[in-house]
Amino acid sequence: MNRELCDFLHLEDSDIDLLDTYTKEKKYIFFDMDGTILNSEPLHYQVVQKLCGNNEIPSMEETFGMSDEEVYPLIQNALGLASLEEFLELKNSALIGLIGQSDPNNIRHRNIRKLLESLTSKGLKLALVTASQYEVTHPLLEHCELKKYFEIIITEREVEKGKPNPEPYLMAQNHFNAKSEECLIFEDSPTGIRAAQSSGIDYIVVKWFEGE
């Protein structure tokens, strides 16, 4: 039976030290992206707002942690587009452009590289597990200089069923040929937390962007 080990409201040096308590028995750490290592949800929402013009759409809080496939039906009328594929093409193009104009320090948590360095220096293997599009995930991680820390990056492209289904996390576990008890997940959104709960892997709920 997996467990929620704790909530982290901040990511200061003392919190990174405390994480040693939770990771010392682990070998593999799986990180969500949006809202966990990067504060990228506002970028996604900014693009969606632009695509929808002045039409009313759900708030960022209402779509927090949802995949593009889940968001599309909620904004379809406001978009006025014919298909999900058209939406993804326009959104990905606009988002990649916005990422290139953004300061990485305003996207990544100010101490996230310190955390990732601490984990990898201890020999832990890291995976990035996100519901975001492949076409956006890789440029975003490269722009924020975080891609190098992850041995495997799992996006919506690599799985048949995304979060809240546990498949993405189980794929990461299988990649390392790991036992559930050897792994640990960092997640922030309700959708991601449900995936973690269903995976059988211990998890930590991240709220450190709220504490900034």
Image (cartoon, grey):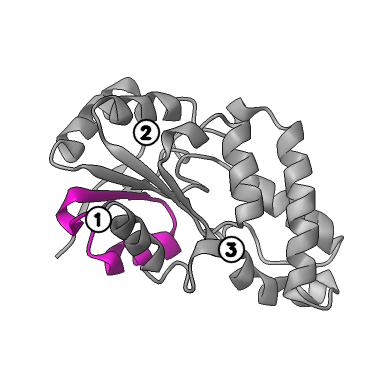
Mark 2 = which residue? 10
> Is 201 a magenta residue?
yes
Can residue 126 be spotted in the picture?
A: yes
Point out which mark residue 90 bears.
none
In percent of width and height, residue 54 lies at 86, 61
> Which x, y percent locates residue 169?
35, 60
**For the residue carrying disc 1, how many other residues have a C-alpha within 10 Å: few (<14), some (14-19), or many (20+)?**
few
Query: Label 2 is placed on what type of residue?
Result: His
Name the N-terminal-most of marks 3 and 1: 3
Question: Going 42% across and 39% down the picture, which residue do you hit?
Answer: 150
Residue 2 falls in image quadrant: bottom left
Residue 28, compared with residue 16, is above or below; it is below
Per the rendered image, the range of residues in magenta is: 178-202
User: Which secondary structure, mark 2?
Assistant: loop
The residue labelled by disc 3 is 63
Which quadrant of the figure has residue 91?
bottom right
The answer to whether any part of residue 66 appears in the image is no
